[in-house]
Image (cartoon, grey):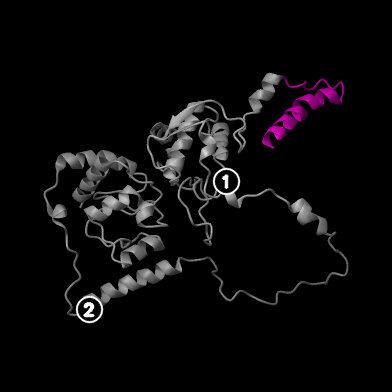
């Protein structure tokens, strides 16, 4: 479809004026000029060039060329598009439409990046770099889970996107247009009158479940404070009360660079896309003041999830596996050493 449009555009813009008459405008497009425009990629792989790239390579390129707008993990910065997460949200009032939740074909990802990205420097990426970036975006969307995964022309069609089956050809010309009739513009009323009003003026959907859980947790804490009942405490495992391994924490600070796009830690820390991580150990999940957590994370806290070395290790390994539908778009740290170091750094950041 796009290839046909490209040829038609080339013919119309360049060839047509020359054929239209002796106006002295335009000429027929050359084969070289047409081939320069004919760069789209179809879902069946037509148009894909030779090349390859790994998740690890893509992470480096994405961090350098794309993260300033889309965040280190595709979580987006400001109002730029979100590229990751959103799985299972298409049934929500406000679905999160990303590569992992909504896009139908991987070819669309490759094609758009190749033609239009990075913003302001389009078509500056080499084919191998595009393959690598697409591989990284597959990784942060849980489409692949191996940092060494290599995407190439040979395996491009082997991995379908989650929502591909929900897209279908537009058959409205055959099923709907034929039954439309011309609009009746006769016998209309002289005046239009409003006879009903919305019962609620503010009709914007709210996270009702999340708000209910917040109130429930708050009421429990308040009740405990107003009675003589012993305060609720969290048993801190010995591993958490042990002296800080400064060398390991220093290594964890380097790993934390993967988290800085969304989280801050330290005296001047502020909430960003994610909550501050000060005093994380012993904290009930989803309870930081001033941050709006997802209903999934608040629910996990209400069910007893408390952050310690063990729970953090599980969460950092694969967040969505531990807390389904969490808003955290990070795919997870696959290396045990990275998680251990990061946990030690977070433990030191009181």
Distance Cα–Cα, label 1 vs label 2: 54 Å
Q: Is residue 93 above or below residue 26?
A: below
Foreground residue, 228 or 156? 156
Residue at the (35%, 46%) spot, across then down: 332
Q: Position of residue 310 (x, y in %)?
A: 23, 54
Q: In the current view of this chain or complex, which residue is farthest to the left?
A: 243
Q: Label 2, on which residue?
A: 226
Residue at the (60%, 34%) spot, across then down: 41
Residue at the (72%, 19%) spot, across then down: 30
Q: Position of residue 224 (x, y in %)?
A: 23, 76
> Splitting the image into 4 quarters, where does residue 148 fall?
top left
Where are the magenta residues, as a range? 1-30
Foreground residue, 136 or 10? 136
Q: Is residue 125 visible?
A: no
Classify residue 229 as left or right of residue 90.
left
Q: Position of residue 110 (x, y in %)?
A: 54, 35
Residue count near mark 2 (Cα–Cα under 10 Å), binned few <14, some 14–19, many ≥20 = few
Secondary structure beneath dot 2 equals loop
- The count of marks equals 2
Q: Position of residue 230 (x, y in %)?
A: 16, 75
Is-magenta flag for residue 37? no
Secondary structure beneath dot 1 equals loop
Q: Label 1, on which residue?
A: 104
Foreground residue, 133 or 119? 133
Foreground residue, 99 or 50? 50
Give the mark toward the camera: 1 or 2.
1
The overriding secondary structure of the stretch rendered in magenta is: helix
Classify residue 200 as left or right of residue 331.
right
Residue at the (73%, 31%) spot, across then down: 9
Classify residue 7 as left or right of residue 106.
right
């Amino acid at each position: 479809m796009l290839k046909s449009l490209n040829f038609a555009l080339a013919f119309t813009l360049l060839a047509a004026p020359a054929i239209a008459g002796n106006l002295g405008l335009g000429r027929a497009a050359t084969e070289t000029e047409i081939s320069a425009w004919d760069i789209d990629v179809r879902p069946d792989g037509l148009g894909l060039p030779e090349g390859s790239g790994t998740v690890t390579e893509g992470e480096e390129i994405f961090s350098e060329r794309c993260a300033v707008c889309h965040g280190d993990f595709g979580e987006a910065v400001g109002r730029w598009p979100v590229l990751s997460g959103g799985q299972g949200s298409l049934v929500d009032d406000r679905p999160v439409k990303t590569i992992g939740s909504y896009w139908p074909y991987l070819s669309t990802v490759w094609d758009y990046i190749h033609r239009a990205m990075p913003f302001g420097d389009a078509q500056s990426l080499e084919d191998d770099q595009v393959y690598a970036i697409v591989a990284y975006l597959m990784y942060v969307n849980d489409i692949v889970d191996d940092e060494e995964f290599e995407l190439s022309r040979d395996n491009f069609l082997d991995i379908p996107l989650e929502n591909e089956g929900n897209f279908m050809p537009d058959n409205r010309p055959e099923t709907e247009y034929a039954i439309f009739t011309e609009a009746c513009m006769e016998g209309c009323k002289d005046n239009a009158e409003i006879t009903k009003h919305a019962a609620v003026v503010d009709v914007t959907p709210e996270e009702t479940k999340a708000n209910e859980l917040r109130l429930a947790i708050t009421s429990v804490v308040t009740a405990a404070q107003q009675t003589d009942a012993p305060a609720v405490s969290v048993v801190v495992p010995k591993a958490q009360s042990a002296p800080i391994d400064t060398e390991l924490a220093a290594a964890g600070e380097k790993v934390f660079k993967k988290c800085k796009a969304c989280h801050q830690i330290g005296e001047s820390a502020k909430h960003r896309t994610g909550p501050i991580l000060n005093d994380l150990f012993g904290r009930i999940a989803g309870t930081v003041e001033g941050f709006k957590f997802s209903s999934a994370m608040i629910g996990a806290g209400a069910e007893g999830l408390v952050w310690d070395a063990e729970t953090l290790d599980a969460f950092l390994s694969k967040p969505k596996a531990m807390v389904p539908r969490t808003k955290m778009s990070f795919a997870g740290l696959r290396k045990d050493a990275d998680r251990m170091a990061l946990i030690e750094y977070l433990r030191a950041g009181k």
